Image (cartoon, rainbow, N blue to C red):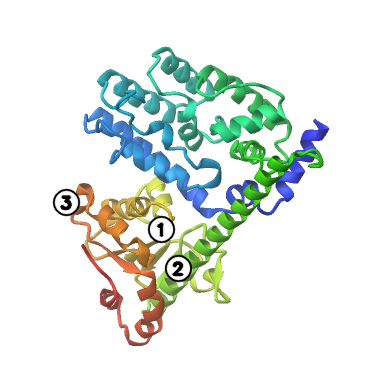
Amino acid sequence: MNQLNQIIQQYKNDSESVYNTWFVDNDQRLKAFRTIRRGVLQVIDDIKNKTFPNDFKGSSLEFVLSCISEQKQIFVGVAHPFYWKPKLRIPDIYENQNNKIAFGQFLENCINAKNEEQVIKEIVRLDELKIKGLGPAVASILYFLHPTWFPPFNTAILNGFNFVFQDKKKLGSWTEYLKIREIIVETNSKHKAELSNDLGAIAGLCFEIGTQKMLIGHDDYLSEDERTKFEKNIIKRQKEIQEEKKEVTLHDEMQYHLLKIGTSLGYDVTPASNDKSKAFNGQSFSFTSLSKFPELPTDKDTQKTIKLIDVLWFKKGTNHIIGAFEVEKSTSIYSGILRLSDLYFSISNGTEVFYIIIPDSREKDVILQLNRPVIRNSKMNIKYILFSELRTQCDAICKFGSDYSIMEKIAKSI
C-alpha cells in the first residue's frame, strides 16, 4: 500500500494528469452528469414509446455516448462498442425488440436505484440474458448515474488496473467487471482522503498507467521502443491539454462579452452557477453578476439545470429572464439546447430570446441540431451567433444597443 500511496501522489502532482485536467479542474465534467442523466431518461422513454431506432446513429443513445466521449482523455472511444454492426448483429439492442426492452428496463432500474446492491442485481440479470455485444462498456454510463458506486471501464483502465494489482482481468465480461469494481471500491475506500468518493479519480489513475502516460518507478529498464511510445504519449497529452486550455479560454471570452453586453443594456446578469469564480481580460465574472440567483417558479431540479446555462439576462430587480445563452465549443451543441429547452418548457412566457454561441467552424453542426424535429416543431425559437461576430461587434452593441433586440443584428436562424 505504501507503493500505491507514492503512485497516487505522483498522479496528483502531475499537472497534466487526468486527475488535474479532467477530474478536479473541469466545469464541463460537472455539467455532463446532469446532461447525461437526462439523456438516459430520453433513451428509456424512446424505448418505452417504441421510437428508439434500429441503428445507433441518430438515436438518443448516440447523444448520451457523445456527451460521455466529449469528456475526452479517459472516455475516448467510449461510443465504439455501441455502434451498430449489422453483419455481426451487435450490440443486439437495435433490431431485437425484446433485447431493446430489456436494455431500457435495465437503464430505468439503475437510474432509480437507491443503493448499489440494486444496480448489481440489475447487472447480473442483464448478464443472464446474454445479449450479444452488450457488455461492461455500459459501465461508463453507470458511472455518470452513480459515480460513487461504479467506476467507468475501458481497455486503458483495465490495463492500468492489471498493472497496479498484478492481475489478468479481461474485457467483455460483466463478471470480470464486478470483480474489478469490488477491488477498486475497496482500494478507494482506503485511499479516499487522497482520492475522492467519486470513483472517477481512481479510474483516472488506472487510465494514466494503462495508456503509459504515467510511469511507475524508474524508467531505466524501458526498451527503446517502449521509451519512444511513452514519449509520444506525453507529446500527445500535452497537445490535447493545450487545445483544451485554448477552448476554455474561448468559452470564458464569449461569456465575458455576453455579460458585458447584458450589463450595458441594463439587465441583471449571471454566468452559469459553477462559472462565477472565472474571469477574463482581468474582469471577474462575479463582480458584474448577481450575488444571488433569483428564485424561479419551477421545481428545484429544473432550476439547477437552468442555473447551468452559460449566461442569463434578467429584467432588472426581477426573476424575469430576458435572454439565455449557451456557449458551445467542442462539446455537444444538443446538450446546450436541452438546457435552453428546460427553461422554455418550464417557465417561458414567450418573451425570452435563446441563443447558441458557436465557433465559426461549427455552423453546419448547429444547423443540423436546430433542424432536429423536436426542436424545429416546437415554438421555441433558438438562434445562433458566431464567435467572430460576438467578439468584433461587442463594443458596438454596448455603445448603440438599447435592449435585447440589438442581438438580432448578429444572430442567425435556420
CA separation in Å, label 1 and label 3: 22 Å
Q: Is mark 3 on a helix, strand or loop?
A: loop
* Position in image of residue 161 (x %, y %): 65, 30
Q: What element carries label 2?
A: helix
Identify the amino acid type marked 2: Gln
* Position in image of residue 121 (x %, y %): 48, 17
Q: Is residue 302 visible?
A: yes
Q: Can residue 319 be seen in this view?
A: no
CA separation in Å, label 3 and label 2: 29 Å
Q: Residue at x 30, y 83 (%)?
A: 402
* Position in image of residue 118 (x %, y %): 48, 21
Identify the amino acid type marked 3: Asn
Circle 1 is placed at which residue position?
Answer: 309
Asked if marks 3 and 2 touch (Cβ < 8 Å), the reply is: no
Quarter in which the C terminus is drawn = bottom left
Closer to the N terminus: mark 3 or mark 2? 2
Task: Identify the mark at residue 355; answer none if there is no mark.
Answer: none
Q: Which residue is drawn at 62% across and 31% down?
A: 159
Is residue 214 or residue 203 the one in the foreground? 214
Quarter in which the N terminus is drawn = top right
Q: Relative to 107, is 25 on the left or the right?
A: right
Circle 3 is placed at which residue position?
Answer: 377
Q: How crowded is mark 1: few (under 14 residues within 10 Å), some or many (20 or more)?
A: many
Circle 2 is placed at which residue position?
Answer: 255
